[in-house]
Image: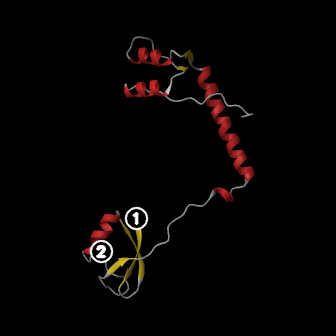
């Protein structure tokens, strides 16, 4: 849905919602949109001010630091959980993931290393993988 400000030939301005911009153009060209004040079919799009998202500048620095600290904590906890509940297979990750996917090895939770090319190949083969954030350092 999209909302347009419209104006008739009598300078009346009003808002109308349309399914999309093409629908708006078609209905305006076909004279299907009437001014609600004077019923004129001579209606066109009016100038509109863009909707601009509020900047995060209004958020205090302290709130931003707390949010970042919380996000870092969640990333650390996610990594700890994966490491505690999975087998580390190191650089053998791509091959081990394939062996499990094709039934050549018992399925289990694993983690390890794969470069971008290897990761893309695994995904192309239909093997579900997910990047894991590296160790999170506080002094970085």
Q: Position of residue 103 (x, y in %)?
A: 38, 14
Give the residue at x 27% y 74%.
Answer: 29
Q: Quadrant of residue 80?
A: top right
Relative depth, front residue between 6 and 118: 118
In the image, taking residue 86 as reference, residue 27 lies left or right, namely: left
Q: Position of residue 115 (x, y in %)?
A: 50, 25
Q: Secondary structure at mark 1?
A: strand
Other-residue count near label 2 (Cα within 10 Å), few / some / many at <14 / 14–19 / ≥20: some
In the image, taking residue 132 as reference, residue 28 lies left or right, namely: left
**Quadrant in the picture for the N terminus:** bottom left
Task: Give the CA separation, mark 2 to mark 1.
Answer: 14 Å
**Quadrant in the picture for the C terminus:** top right
- Which scheme is used to colour this image of the protein? secondary structure
Q: Secondary structure at mark 2?
A: helix
- In the image, residue 89 sits, relative to residue 15, either above or below, namely above
Q: Position of residue 62 (x, y in %)?
A: 75, 50
Give the residue at x 72% y 50%.
Answer: 63
Mark seen at residue 68? none
Give the residue at x 59% y 31%.
Answer: 133
Mark seen at residue 28? 2
Q: Quadrant of residue 46?
A: bottom left
Which residue has dot 1 on it? 2
Give the residue at x 46% y 73%.
Answer: 48
Q: How many marks?
A: 2
């Amino acid at each position: 849905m999209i909302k347009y400000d419209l104006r008739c030939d009598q300078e009346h301005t009003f808002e109308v919602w349309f399914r999309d911009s093409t629908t708006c153009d078609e209905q305006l060209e076909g004279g299907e949109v009437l001014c609600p004040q004077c019923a004129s079919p001579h209606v066109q799009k009016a100038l509109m001010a863009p909707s601009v998202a509020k900047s995060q500048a209004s958020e205090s620095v302290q709130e931003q630091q707390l949010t970042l600290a919380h996000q870092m904590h969640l990333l650390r906890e996610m990594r700890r959980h994966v490491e505690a509940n999975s087998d580390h297979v190191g650089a053998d990750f791509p091959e081990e993931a394939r062996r499990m996917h094709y039934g050549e090895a018992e399925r289990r939770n694993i983690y390890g290393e794969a470069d971008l090319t290897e990761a893309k190949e695994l995904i192309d083969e239909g093997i579900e993988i997910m990047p894991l954030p590296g160790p999170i350092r506080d002094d970085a």
